[in-house]
């Protein structure tokens, strides 16, 4: 098998479709990992076919190496269908591995699968006579388009109309691609949440003891369509709630800590956080999130909470050991 593949590569008889696949793989990896290309629409432009078409196409190429096995329309349709089936199965398999469903394992798995299927297709085609191998009929396709839009013995008006129609088709395709790779901005928002010690929305530390360390997780999800360095402030608070007029009064507010968390757009950062109560008398822990501006230190109590971008709290009981 290796001898067969090496002979085909050495003689430069690698089919044009597999050459395009190999080049597209390289461009996809560059589009994902090479800055600043990975911050442009090229990342999506190269990545979409890598997910929706190429894996299925290489699998079909390996299964049906002959030109008479299936026709071109079936080959294209099955390529889309099998890609939609294969990629989720690869993700499902990764879910049961230590690497999980993350960008790097997915990219590596898709590249390995695509290269393996391409080599299998190259080997299987090499076993067939030249006239029976599947090749992409680029010349025939070009001639068909030419005959369709610019048939012989046509008037200048017909040729002009054909050019306008062809330009309209190209513009429609380009517009569709642009809409896909440059989607319209949706609602802008930031997620702010706290989790317990097991990274679950449960088992929060509410019964505390002075001098004893307690821990939880603080999560921030950025969906603001820009990179933001958030500021998180935490406070021990003593707050009373008046049921008569439905108002809250902050009697004491002692800072615990302040830290910044840089979060890129469309990413979520979960940060471990621990604190130690030093005295009793507090009944609430306040978590404040600021995006761009942080108010002056003189702003305290409910005013500071109201000026925060997001706020969370835990009702706690603090006892002496």
Image (tube, rainbow, N blue to C red):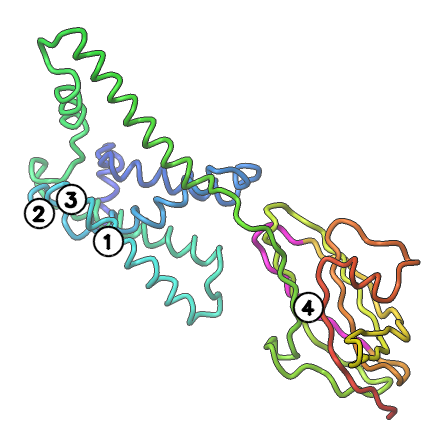
Disc 4 is placed on an element classified as strand
Alpha-carbon span between mark 3 and mark 1: 23 Å
Q: Image height check: is 82 above or below 204?
A: above
N-term mark: 2 or 1: 2
Residue displayed at 64% across by 74% down: 195
Q: Image height check: is 135 above or below 166?
A: below
- Residue placed under numbered mark 2 in the picture: 69
Task: Please report the bounds of the magenta region as a residue range.
Answer: 263-275
Relative to the observer, which residue lies in front, 179 or 308?
Answer: 308
- Residue placed under numbered mark 3 in the picture: 125
- Residue placed under numbered mark 1 in the picture: 81
Disc 3 is placed on an element classified as helix
Disc 2 is placed on an element classified as loop
On the picture, is 75 further left or further right than 176? Answer: left
- Residue placed under numbered mark 4 in the picture: 218
- Which percent across, then down, holds residue 180? 41, 41
Which dot marks residue 291? Answer: none
Kindly indicate the quadrant of the structure image that contains residue 171. top left
Q: In which quarter of the image is the C terminus?
A: bottom right
Alpha-carbon span between mark 2 and mark 1: 18 Å
């Amino acid at each position: 098998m290796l001898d067969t593949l090496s002979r085909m590569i050495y003689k430069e008889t690698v089919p044009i479709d597999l050459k395009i696949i190999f080049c597209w793989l390289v461009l996809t990896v560059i589009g994902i990992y090479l800055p600043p290309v990975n911050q442009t629409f090229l990342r999506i432009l190269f990545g979409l076919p890598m997910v929706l078409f190429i894996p299925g196409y290489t699998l079909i190429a390996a299964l049906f190496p002959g030109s008479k096995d299936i026709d071109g329309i079936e080959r294209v349709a099955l390529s889309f269908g099998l890609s939609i089936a294969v990629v989720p199965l690869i993700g499902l398999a990764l879910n049961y591995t230590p690497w999980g469903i993350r960008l790097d394992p997915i990219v590596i798995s898709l590249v390995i699968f695509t290269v393996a299927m391409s080599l299998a297709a190259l080997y299987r085609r090499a076993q067939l006579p030249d006239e029976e191998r599947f090749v992409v009929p680029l010349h025939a396709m070009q001639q068909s388009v030419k005959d369709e839009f610019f048939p012989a013995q046509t008037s200048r008006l017909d040729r002009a109309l054909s050019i306008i129609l062809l330009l309209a088709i190209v513009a429609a395709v380009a517009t569709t691609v642009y809409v896909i790779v440059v989607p319209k901005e949706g609602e802008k928002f930031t997620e702010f949440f706290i989790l317990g010690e097991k990274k679950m929305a449960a088992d929060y530390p509410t019964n505390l003891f002075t001098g004893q360390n307690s821990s939880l997780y603080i999560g921030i999800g950025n969906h603001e369509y820009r990179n933001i360095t958030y500021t998180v402030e935490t406070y021990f608070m003593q707050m009373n709630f008046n049921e008569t007029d439905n108002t809250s009064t902050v009697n004491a507010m002692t800072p615990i800590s302040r830290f910044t968390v840089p979060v890129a757009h469309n990413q979520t950062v979960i940060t471990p956080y621990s604190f130690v109560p030093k005295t009793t008398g507090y009944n609430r822990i306040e978590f404040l999130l600021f995006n761009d501006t942080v108010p002056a230190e003189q702003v305290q109590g409910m005013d500071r909470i109201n000026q925060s971008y997001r706020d969370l709290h835990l009702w706690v009981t603090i006892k002496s050991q």
